[in-house]
Image (cartoon, grey):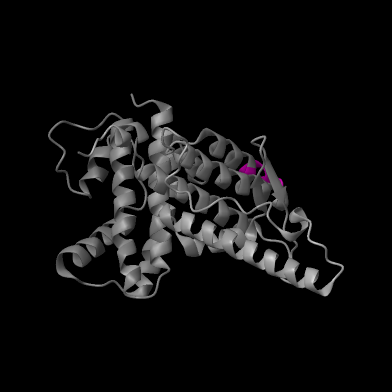
Amino acid sequence: MIPKETIIKRLAFIKYLYKVAIEQSQRPEPLSSASILTFHDAVELFLHLAAEHLDVWKKGKEQMKFMDYWVLLATKKELAQKASMEGLNNARVGLKHHGILPSKENIDSFRASTETFFTENTLKVFEINFSDISLIDLVQCEATKDNLNEAEKLLKEEKIEDALDKVAVAFAQLIDDYENRKRGSFGRSPFFFGESMTFLNSFSIGIDRETKFGRELSSFVDKVTDSVKALQNAVKILSLGLDYRRYVKFRLLTPIITKVISGKYYIERMRWGTKGMPTKEDVMSCIDFVIESAITLQKFDFSVEEEESITII
C-alpha cells in the first residue's frame, strides 16, 4: 500500500506536468506540438500510479504499452476517456516516431479530453478531487509552503491583497532560504552582487532639498540607488536560473518586500493604477510562479560543505 502522503506528492507532480502541457499547448505552432508529449507523460504517470495504488501492478509488466493499462485497471476500476486517450497516444506516436505535427484543433481537443480524464479518474481511483490537488506539496522550503497555503486560503475568501502579501513573502523566503544554505564558511554568498542599497536613498542620507543643488543631488542619488537595486535583483534572478520574464509579471502584481535587520519582512503594498485590482487568476499565476521557482531551485541543489571540501593544488 502506497502511503497517502506519497500519493499526494506524486499526484501533485502529475498535475504540474499537466499544467506545463497546457502552457505548451498555448504556444504558437509548431511549438505547441510539444504539449502532446507532455500530456501523454502526465497521463501515463497517472496510470502507473493507479496500477500501484489498486494493487494490480504485476512483475514483468515494466514494458507494458500505454493502452494496456485500461485492461489491467479494469479488474478494479473502469477508467473513463479510453477512446480519447487512445487518440492522444496515436498522436504522440505520430509525432515522436514519424514527425507528424498535430493540428491546432487536435491539440485543443486533447487538452480538453486530458482535463476530463484527470477530473473523472482522480476521483474514481483515489477519491480525491483533481482540483483540490495542490502543487504546493512539491515545495520543500517549509516557510514558503506555509505562506503559499495561507495565500490559497485567503484567495478562497476573496482577499486578493492579503493573498498577494503572502505570495510575495513566500518568494522572498524561498530565495533567502536557498541563498543562506549556499553561504560559505565565512558567510559569503555565491549570489552576492554588491551591498544592499535599500537604505541609501536621499532621505536616509539626509540630503538638503531646500536648494536647487540639493534637489538635483537627491534626484541623482535616488535614481542611481534604484538602478543599482534593479540590476542587482535582475542578475540574482537570472543567476538562479529563474524565468525572468515571468518574474517581471510577478513583480508587477506583488508588493515590495524588504527584510529588516530583525529578520522580519516588511511589506510595501502597490498602488493600483487604471487597470484596477489584480484578479484571482493573477494571484494563481503568482502562486504558480513561486512553486515553479521552488522546483527549479530544488532541481539544482548542492552542498556547500561538499564544494568547500575540494582543495585545488
Left or right: 225 as drawn, with respect to 120: right
- Choose between 26 and 1: the one closer to the eye: 26
Residue furthest to the right = 210
Q: Residue at x 33, y 71 (%)?
A: 31
The image shows a total of numbered marks equal to: 0
- Choose between 200 and 235: the one closer to the eye: 200
Vertical position of residue 212 compared to residue 153: above or below: below
Q: Residue at x 39, y 42 (%)?
A: 298
- Asked whether the viewer can see residue 299, the reply is yes
Residue 153 belongs to magenta span: yes
Left or right: 165 as drawn, with respect to 29: right
Residue furthest to the left = 60
- Choose between 33 and 139: the one closer to the eye: 139
Q: Quadrant of the N terminus?
A: top left
Q: Quadrant of the C terminus?
A: top left
- In percent of width and height, residue 30 lies at 31, 74
- In percent of width and height, residue 39 lies at 34, 56
- Asked whether the viewer can see residue 129, the reply is no
Q: Residue at x 28, y 28 (%)?
A: 55
Q: Which residues are magenta?
A: 151-157
Vertical position of residue 218 compared to residue 161: above or below: below
Residue 21 belongs to magenta span: no
Left or right: 138 as drawn, with respect to 266: left
Residue 202's image quarter? bottom right
- In percent of width and height, residue 285 lies at 55, 56
**Helix, strand or loop: magenta stretch:** helix
- In percent of width and height, residue 191 lies at 45, 48
